[in-house]
Image: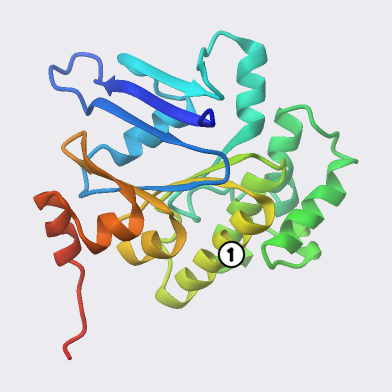
Amino acid sequence: MTPVLELSAASFAYRGSAAPVVEDVSLSVAAGQSLALVGESGAGKTTLLRLLLGPARPTAGAVRFDGDRLNLRDRAQMRRFRRSVQCVFQDPYSSLDPRRRVGDIVSEPLHSLGIDSRRTAVLKVAEALERVGLPADAAERYPHEFSGGQRQRIAIARATVCDPRVLLADEPVSALDVTTRVKVVELLGELKEERGLTLVMVSHDLSVVASLCERTAVLERGRIVEQGDTAQVLGAPAHPYTRRLVESVPRLPV
């Protein structure tokens, strides 16, 4: 089966920098699968997510979408890609424009991708908000009227309103309190199962990874040191770096 997203020997270095941020990374995710990218801060996780999303281009290697090399100059391909791949960002406070009503925020992908007009988008916005557990009248309110967890639900509604095939999530629950975090994780799991979403998620929280993702790739200093089935990677890690990550998770005293 052709992976829906794939990195093939991909490296990335900032202009003027001698050392790459990520180097010779190969990974793939199949349709309907969930993949976690884990590692310490600065390991290159968010850079990989940016390569998969398109804003960053690899300085070596390739990003492939449905088997074809991603070409930012191919308008037809990029249109298919933008409709198929959406992202949820880390901070629900800064990722939503405080000057715009929620309905306008959620409908933005429908307008920018030319899927719906402002009038025909209303029903899809209401459905997207209901799907993430918010009332349809939330569309008339502003982001500051909602809690952090509700704002992240708004961000998820925006990302899923155009029925994408792939959802990229950059630390989607790290800015939330524990109770809200559990609810948002449950929501992502439900959306994945009900809508067949492919999920690629960056996370420091290994408990979230264990509950949401079937596969895990571990990054150390821009390189993948271990990847495979999440239960195997986290339950019986083969690499010393992965073992240190797992052992660093706080545990309640018995």
Residue that numbered label 1 is attached to: 187
- Residue 119, percent from left and from top: 90, 41
Tell me the residue at 17%/58% (across/down): 245
In this view, the residue in front, 66 or 174, is 66
Q: What is the tally of numbered marks visible in this picture?
A: 1
Q: For the view shown, which residue lies furthest in the left direction?
A: 240
Question: Within 10 Å of the Cα at label 1, are there few (<14), some (14-19), or many (20+) other Cα atoms?
Answer: some
Residue 104 in which image quadrant: top right
Above or below, comparing residue 141 to residue 158 in the picture:
below
Up/down of 109 relative to 127, above or below:
above
Q: Position of residue 67 (x, y in %)?
A: 52, 21
Helix, strand or loop under label 1:
helix
Residue at 63% from the left image edge and 66% from the top image edge: 145
Residue situated in front as seen by the camera: 161 or 144 = 161
**Residue 126: which quarter of the image?**
bottom right
Q: Position of residue 168 (x, y in %)?
A: 49, 42
Q: Quadrant of the C terminus?
A: bottom left
Residue 165: in sight, yes or no?
yes
Which residue is farthest bottom?
254
The quadrant the N terminus occupies is top right
